[in-house]
Amino acid sequence: MNQKQLEQMKLKKGFIAALDQSGGSSPKALKAYGIDQDQYNNDEEMFDLMHQMRTRMIKSPSFSGDKILGAILFQNTMDRKIDGKYTPDFLWEEKGIIPFLKVDKGLEPEKEGIQLMKPITDLTQTLEQAQKRNIFGTKMRSVIHAANPEGIKKIVDQQFEYGRQIADAGFAPILEPEVDITIPDKKEAEAILKDVIEKHLKDLPENELIMLKLSIPTVPGLYSEIMKDPHVVRVVALSGGYTREEANKKLAENPGLIASFSRALAEGLSANQTEEEFNKTMKHSVDAIFEASIK
């Protein structure tokens, strides 16, 4: 693990940019960016357009290590280049931004009020490739749809099980048991989730480090104690479908919690904007999310 990157992630002010839309979510991301499905014919063309969008975001002047600590990439992006450098190297060497990699393979159908991750059958090979590309950490997402203690325990068990494998390979895993922000028992689900996470943290080996990516809690400050645990490098928040304004407002109510936004970060960006318009929108987004992350 790169110790300079670890210190930056632990101590520096800022947030994490989530640029990890994969095959299933790319059409929606492109549509929001102003590119409809009739503008590409296959997955290869779609991923070319996604990389163009991500490259434009990353090369924008405000997308820098001054306010952005890290960026989460999809594997297709990790293996592509920006100005002759692999994307993770461009992020770190040119922007001072720590590269992460999404490693999950999507979700199982809902059962017991949760969606577990599909088995990550190629995790060893993926981590070997990530090491070659100078990736610092990983991210994997599962979803909680109800305050079901048995289901929530299963989802956290799975996250920590994979997290241990990833940490043993020398990476900082971001565990993401997302709580659906639309469910009526969100507050109750988050209370259960907190308790289960705390139990797992007590069982971790002394030097094992993880990160957590969680929905912004209904009760402000709910995860404050978890942030103090020596195993936890950082707790970051997903926007979860909130608008950027809503997400920033809720985030600011939780000192120590920093953003890891995807849709909220790209909100307002368009393929049809001039470079001046695009960069102005990007700066507004970065500045607003940064301010909410340092409250």
Image: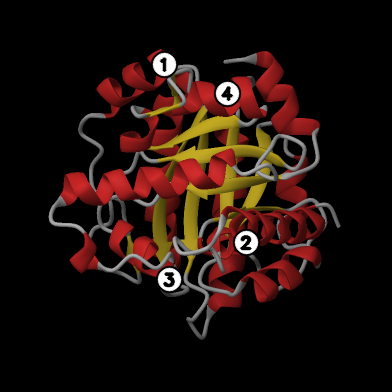
- Secondary structure, mark 2, is helix
Amino acid on which disc 4 is placed: Pro
Q: Which of marks 2 and 4 is nearer the N terminus?
A: 4
Circle 3 sits on which residue?
A: 148
Q: Earlier in the sequence, mark 1 or mark 4?
A: 1
Q: Which of marks 1 and 3 is nearer the N terminus?
A: 1
- Secondary structure, mark 4, is loop
In the rendered structure, find residue 277 and report the number of the disc placed on it: 2
Is there CB contact under 8 Å for labels 2 and 4?
A: no
Q: Which of marks 2 and 1 is nearer the N terminus?
A: 1
Residue lying at the far right of the rendered structure: 295
Amino acid on which disc 3 is placed: Asn
Circle 4 sits on which residue?
A: 205
Camera-side residue of 116 and 213: 213
252 over 66 or under it: above or below: below
Mark 2 or mark 3, which is nearer to you? Answer: 2
Residue lying at the far bottom of the rendered structure: 184
Q: Distance between the residues labelled 2 and 1?
A: 37 Å
Query: Residue 250 appears at what percent x and percent y?
Result: 72, 71
Camera-side residue of 105 and 59: 59
Amino acid on which disc 2 is placed: Glu
